[in-house]
Image (tube, helix red, strand yellow):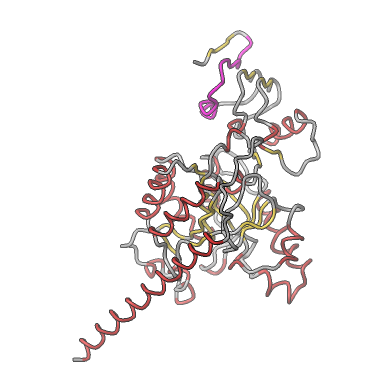
Amino acid sequence: MSRFIGMFFRKFYSLINNYYAWRYWCYLYRNMKNHIPREKTKKINSMPQYLDRPGIAFSFDDSFRIYDWYKYGKGIFEDNNVKVTFNINAFHHFEGKREHTQKEIDMLLELQSKGHEIAHHSFSHKKATEYSNKFGMNGWIENEIESLNKWMKSQRHSKTLEGFKRPVTFAFPHSLFNEQYIKELVPRYFKIVRGHLHNDNLISFNHSGFAPSICLDGYYSVNLFYLKKMMKLAKKTGRNLILTCHSILPKEINWEDYSWGEESKKSGTWRITPETLQEIIDQAKRMGLAFYTTSEISGVATFIDPNFEKYVKVLISNSTANWILIADLCSIKELDLSKKEISNLDGIQYFINLEKITLDSNNLTNFRLLDKLPKLKEIIYNSDLNVNVI
């Protein structure tokens, strides 16, 4: 009898939870729709060609989940040509709150080398409002913002020796903040600071400041029916959705197998399955939506090689700029990078109208990103050898 009662209540609570989840997503969609002007948003003529259609940006929080991202997400993103944003801390939330191991750092840098954005999520994942109440705003910025910047700058891949790019975007831990935090962080440290839910939850290209996002896991897991409707709103208005997730884990993986103790139990509920990710990606492709990193939506071009970045700033006559804008690179048709001591071409993909490039006397071994330039006709990488690209 007691077993039957237990089954009844589990079924009852499951139905109640499903109802509240449905009501949450229904309200979220209707609220978005009500905040969108009735007239269709006109496409901005000055939009960089690289960002020529609305899309979505997947944003994953908490880098203690790096093994999940790498094992269950990396292949999906590569197979579907999808770039995402990973928001990192400098330490593991559990396991004694240790700093990331070299193996974990290598995995993050390998994700970066595949075109994914490694963004800022604070040094130790402290709630901004609580931390600054105790140590002041300057204390929070010094210990949580500047400390992670320094930590990222000091890291290198154990084999390639590549380092992290300077972070362009920031995700507030627990999405806790106020207007003062935005003013302190933008534009001094970041182009975009990401939070949770605001009005229509859509953001335009070349955005700066606060950016809302929709969380796909946690309390109310994603409702694909309403998410599809939200994606349609993005397409209709020519704007973008940021979709926040945490762990990427198959259903059969038991969180308790990580042996991180009772303290980690709540974190284990923030997860999305590879199958659900694939379904969202497939739907976005059917609708003609693109996939961007958060920094790309902000209109910023990023580079791994500091010599390449330095030269580009000189090229666009803006050597002191915080950010190199994608819009400033789209009009360049010829690029002479000879003798610039460049070892990585990351960032070249933003020169969407490039027709000719000279690469003499550099330290380059990988030219795969040149395949992303549809108008490229001539590559010169040796003074005695010209390669014509069809």
Q: Position of residue 388 (x, y in %)?
A: 53, 12
User: Quick one: which residue is furthest to the left in this view?
Assistant: 1
User: Quick one: which residue is furthest to the bottom in this view?
Assistant: 1
User: In the rendered structure, which segment of residues is drawn in magenta?
Assistant: 367-383
For the point 54% across and 69% down, the residue is: 96
For the point 59% across and 62% down, the residue is: 199
**Please, is residue 365 above or below residue 226 in the view?**
above
The answer to if 104 sits in the magenta stretch is no
**Please, is residue 345 above or below residue 242 in the view?**
above
The answer to if 374 sits in the magenta stretch is yes
Q: Position of residue 298 (x, y in %)?
A: 64, 46
Q: Position of residue 384 (x, y in %)?
A: 61, 8
Q: Position of residue 14 (x, y in %)?
A: 33, 76
Residue 250's quadrant in the figure? bottom left
Residue 228's quadrant in the figure? bottom left
Residue 178's quadrant in the figure? bottom right
**Please, is residue 290 above or below residue 257 in the view?**
above
**Please, is residue 152 above or below residue 126 in the view?**
above
State which quarter of the image contains the N terminus: bottom left
Q: Judge from the rendering whether residue 170 lies leftward or rightward of residue 291; answer left or right.
A: right
